[in-house]
Amino acid sequence: MRNTGRARIRLSGVVAIGVVLGLTTAGNALAAPLAPAAGDTRSCPAPGKEPRIGHEPRFLDANVALFAGGDYTADGATAEAEGLLVIGGNATFAKGSGGVFNVGRVGAGSGILPASGSVMLSVGGDLTIAKGTRVDVGHGLTAGPRYGGAVQVGGTIDVKGGLETNGGARSSGLGARKALSPYDTFGDTLRGESAALGALKPTGTTVRSGQSVTFKGGNGASGPQVFEISAKDLDGTSSFDFENIPGNSSVVVNVTGGQPVGISPLSVGFNGDRVDVYDSARFGEAASRILYNFEASPSITLGGGGNFMGSILAPKASADLTASTNGRVYVGGNLRTHGTGNESHNYPWNGSSKFSCKPTPDSPGTEPVPTPTATTPGTEPSSPAPSVTTPAGESPAPSAPETTAPGSPAPSAPSTEDASAPAAPGTTAPSPSATGAGDGSLATTGAQFTPYAIAAAVLGAVGAGILVLTRRRRALGRH
């Protein structure tokens, strides 16, 4: 009996070890690599080779991903904005139920990011972060001599929630011009490019039928494919089909007239393929080839929870977003994003050197670079330790799990290096953003590692079971 008792004690220890091993393995699965290894990142994707939605950084881009000449507000249950954000006025992050808002690097996106340690949030006015909201800038970007993402603010930084720069520098009181540099005149660039594109003659035809619009390219036309539609005709549409677009031609949709435009994107077709679903092999390509030029519209509303495909150029407009965007977002006025799990994914537009992917300094075009390098002098942190700001006397507010609209699919974790995070075919709602409460992790947009954790736990349990059976046989053999 004494031997049996000792055997049971040993068995209990083995089970405990097996459980710990299983949980440890699951934890390692959850802690997937957050940044590319040295030499794995290429500076810019080749035209037509833009990646689908995925979880890991793939390319470096020093250009502006999202620009608002006025104020920027992220509230409701909006999730994240990929790439460099340049805000001319004030920036306010105040999620309705609290939680994380990612800037620079996101849970699942294009993987086309600013370099580690470079500026990812540039604000000409004041930066305000409400209680319960945590802004996470450049999470996990540690592949170079610099870390995370830097924040530059012309006015004051008022953090009642949390500001995480992951070792990136932060500065305030710079004044608008210095805080926005080198993009302090970007608003002028938008106006000039919008006027130039608006002067192009159409090369194809545009037909609206119900809530659908078909853009049909010209046969054998070289250069960009240019279409024209009035703001009145575009207003209220939801489905968009681009047909007969040759080669790698960029697409310009010139929206004429000074009326407001409201769109609720539900589906986008491109040369016979549906491209607004995450499992489309041409998702990144289509997003990088299309641009809508709202030269005179005073306001743009992207409603619903679908995917808007292509860049937005609207130098005179303010914008209200609950849909996800896939492309550059450039507006001259205010921008508010307040949907449920909606995101801004950084896909450059290849039709203009002003809006295309901009290689980081000293990066040889599309060749591999040794390590991500910073683009702004003076942003190198003194140490790679995460940098968190919380009000005196308060602890950082825990982040609550994000929510998403019912029926919105979550992209699955990639199984190969170039795998994407697919949505279910036929759906366009954005993936959810989930954040473990108070764990300081990236709000993963579809980067749900639960299957890996379960598999790891099962493997751990199987290993524990084998050890238990082995010890039991030995114990019984001694009787």
Image (cartoon, rainbow, N blue to C red):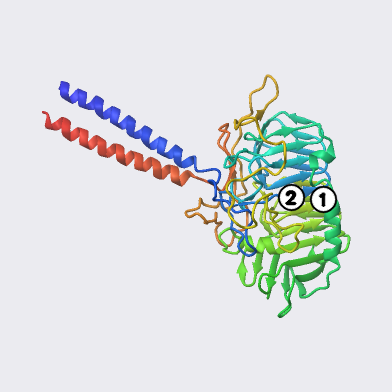
Marks 2/1 in contact by CB < 8 Å: the verdict is yes
Disc 2, SS:
strand
Mark 2 or 1, nearer chain start: 2
Quarter occupied by residue 277: bottom right
Which residue occupies 71% across, 46% down?
84
Q: Residues within 10 Å of mark 2 (few under 14, many from 20)?
A: many
Which image quarter holds the C terminus?
Answer: top left
Quarter occupied by residue 35: top right
Asked if 174 appears above or below 252 in the picture, the reply is: above
Which image quarter holds the N terminus?
Answer: top left
Asked if 252 appears above or below 383 in the picture, the reply is: below
Disc 1 marks a residue whose amino acid type is: Phe
Q: Toward the viewer: 458 or 340?
A: 458
Q: Residues within 10 Å of mark 1 (few under 14, many from 20)?
A: many
Q: Toward the viewer: 281 or 79?
A: 281
| Residue 236 seen by the camera | no
Residue 125 placement, left or right of 115: right
Which residue occupies 30% across, 39% down?
463
Quarter occupied by residue 395: top right
> Which label was assigned to residue 375?
none
The picture places residue 125, in percent across and down from the top left corner, at 82, 37
> Which label was assigned to residue 186?
1
Disc 2 marks a residue whose amino acid type is: Val
**Residue carrying label 2:** 64
The picture places residue 118, in percent across and down from the top left corner, at 68, 42
| Residue 154 seen by the camera | yes
Which residue occupies 62% across, 49% down?
405
Name the residue furthest left: 479
Asked if 279 appears above or below 466 in the picture, the reply is: below
